[in-house]
Every structure is written in structure tokens, then in C-alpha cells.
Image (tube, grey):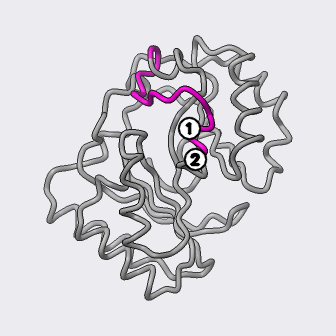
Amino acid sequence: MERYNKITNKNNREIVLLKGFPCVWGKCTFCDYIDDNGLDEKEINKLNKEILDKVDGEFGILEVINSGSCFELPIETLKYIKEVVDRMGIKKIFLESHWCYRHRLDEMRKLFNIEIVFKIGIETFDNDFRNLVLNKNANFKTPEEVKKLFQSVCIMVGIKGQTKEQIKKDIEIVLNNFKYATINVFIENTTNVKRDEELIKWFCKEFKELENHETIEVLFHNTDFGVGD
């Protein structure tokens, strides 16, 4: 399992994949990433410290991800991230959060006291598909609700049941409302959710220009950031 990398093709930054406690929701129909968590706080902190010690501050920007939300990282790990941020002169940090933690974002701002880009996996702005099919438990009604709280969204394309119209609308919303975004092309895993190859071929052709967008990243595999397994 790779847990540290430097991203240099766009949005240059260091990225760490840490371990956390179990995801607060953990019921998304398409997700088996939550298997990378644990309950042994001592072992989690030990591993996370080893990963964070690789950060050298080259770009002044750090992204921290785990199989859930930043709020599921142990307090000791969060304090050590803060130590690394201060020691290495990090000026901006990317953190992930589930919608259910939206009222707690200021806790992280108070802890780190630097610019934070909060990312959220909403997968789609289609409310029914997001909650009834993907079971995200993210019950907002409009993109504006998300935009008020989060600066970056993660959406997913290529799932059986999605339509071209849904994807077009999602991309339009992203381009008009968010500076940062990650578009994940769905990769089949241990869940029962299936990949739509024809829809993915269409997406790759229709939105090829996104590969050149300065702050939108298209991931054709879930390890394209150089971390994970």
C-alpha cells in the first residue's frame, strides 16, 4: 500500500493516505475503501507518524486523505499533522469530509490556522441517484448549499444507471461553482455496483479538455494520485 506521493502534473502538492477510525457512515453502495481503517489507536498513530515523516514541504501544500473523513483521524494524528505543517512551512492543506460533518469544519480551521481546501465526495448532484442509488446520505438540495461550505467536490462517472445528461449537468455545475474538483472514473471493486464501459468511452471523448484544466483532476484509476492499492 503506497501512502505517500508527490503530485506534479497539476496542483503540485504532497499527498498522504493515512489510517483512521471507521467511516461515520460506511454504507455507500459503491465503496469498499472503508476497509482501510481500524480501531487500534496506538497502531494507527504509529503508522500515520511514519507516513507524515516523509513530508518535506517542497510545494508548501499538503493533501491528507483517509478512508473516510478527516474527523475520523485520531487526535494524536491530527496534532502531529499540525506539527508537520508548522515545521515544514505548509501554507495550504486539503482535507476531506463527509456531509454529516459540515457543521464542524471550523474545528479544523482553528487547529491548523492556515488555508484549508475542504473536499467532499458527493459523486453526483442528482439527488435521487446520490442518495437512493449510491446511498451517500448527503441530503442537500442545491449546489449552492455545498459551495457555501466546501471548495472542492469529488464526482464519479461511469456507473451503471447514470446517464449522459446527469454527467453533463454535473460537469456544468462543477465548472460554474467550484475552483477545484476530482472526477473519478468508476473502477469495479468488491461491491455489486457495475461499471458502464460505453458511458466511460463517451465521457472520455466528450470531456477530454478537462485533462488540461488547471485545477480539475480526472482519475481514471483510484490510485492515480500515487497512493492506495
Q: From the viewer's perspective, is 130 left or right of 42?
A: right
Q: x, y (%) of residue 85?
A: 45, 79
Q: Position of residue 71 (x, y in %)?
A: 32, 54
As helix, strand or loop, the secondary structure at mark 1 comes to helix
Is there CB contact under 8 Å for labels 2 and 1?
yes
Name the residue at 61% across, 44% down.
Answer: 147
Read off the residue under disc 1. 145
Left or right, 87 with respect to 43, comes to right
Q: Out of 183 and 143, give the one closest to the viewer.
A: 143
Which amino acid type corresponds to the residue marked 2 in the rendered image? Lys
Does residue 88 lie above or below 70 as drawn? Answer: below
Residue 181 in percent (x, y) is at: 65, 46
Residue located at (52% from left, 15% from top): 128
Q: Secondary structure at mark 2?
A: loop
User: Mark 1: which amino acid?
Assistant: Glu
Q: Is residue 78 left or right of residue 62?
A: left
Residue at 28 percent across and 68 percent down: it is 77
Pointer 2 residue: 148
